[in-house]
Amino acid sequence: MVEQVSFLSTAFSRNVRNTQNIAEVSRERSNRLSTGLRVSQPNDDPADYFRAKALIDRVSDLGNAKGALQLEQGGDQASVLGLDTVEKFGKQLEGIALAAKSAESAQERQALSDQFNEVRNQINNLVGDATFLGKNLIASNTVSDLNIGDANADYNGFATLSDIDTAIASVNSAVSQVRSTQSDYAVDIAISNVRENFTDDLSNILQDGVDKLVNADLNEDAATLLAAQVRSDLSFQGQKILAQGESLLLGLF
């Protein structure tokens, strides 16, 4: 009889330990289902945790690099916009000079010369305003840099056709110079776009690696949790039966 009581006590203790193990599994799987993570701290899986952390740090570095790239792109795009406006002013200057060719009086040519200078001054104003994060982007595109002269001082107030032709030649040369600079910026923008796309693709690959290392398999964890709940219920019933059996045996003494 004593041996039977001892057996029941041992079985009861074993059943209690089993219940505790089931409770731990249930807690772990419930946490995975609520967070979506298999690994959220070093103790969960040290190797995968630190591998994932290294990948996350790399993704963060790439994010910083992308931010710098976007700033470069913003500067390049602002430069292209500024140069495009300079080119438009250049075409206006050419139109004014061409109009001077058909002017019928010196007074008309002088008026057009004054208009030419007004538009010319706008180029310098624009160049001075073309800043991005405190940096002047097209500072080397003033009328002096582009060799666009003053209509009165350099082109004799459009007094002769030769003076007008000289002005037109200067403006056309300036427009070509501006277009060449625009082309350089366009190449820079294209390169930045390729680098940004590469950064995005690499970040996505690294993030996918992180997900594979730390994310939980929700279907598997849900099934395991359900199984643990069933086992817990069965274990509880087993404890009740063992307790009742032990009480009955002790009552015989």
Image: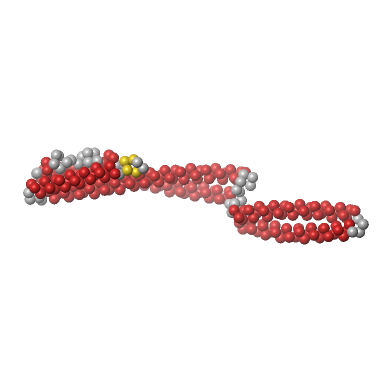
- The C terminus: image quadrant: bottom right
- The N terminus: image quadrant: bottom right
* Residue 9, x across and y down, in percent: 84, 53
Image height of 15 relative to 75, above or below: below
Q: Quadrant of residue 192?
A: top left
Instruction: Name the outermost residue toward the left.
Output: 105
Image height of 3 relative to 157, above or below: below
Tell whether 169 sits left or right of 216.
left
Q: How was the colour assigned to the protein in this rendering?
A: secondary structure
* Residue 225, x across and y down, in percent: 67, 57
Tell whether 60 sits left or right of 182.
right
Please indicate, yes or no, whether residue 245 appears anywhere in the rendered image: yes
Which one is in front, 114 or 142?
Answer: 114
Tell whether 223 sits left or right of 247.
left
Please indicate, yes or no, whether residue 176 appears anywhere in the rendered image: no
Residue at point 38% right, 44% down? 72
Residue at point 56% right, 44% down? 53
Residue at point 30% right, 48% down? 81
* Residue 80, x across and y down, in percent: 31, 46
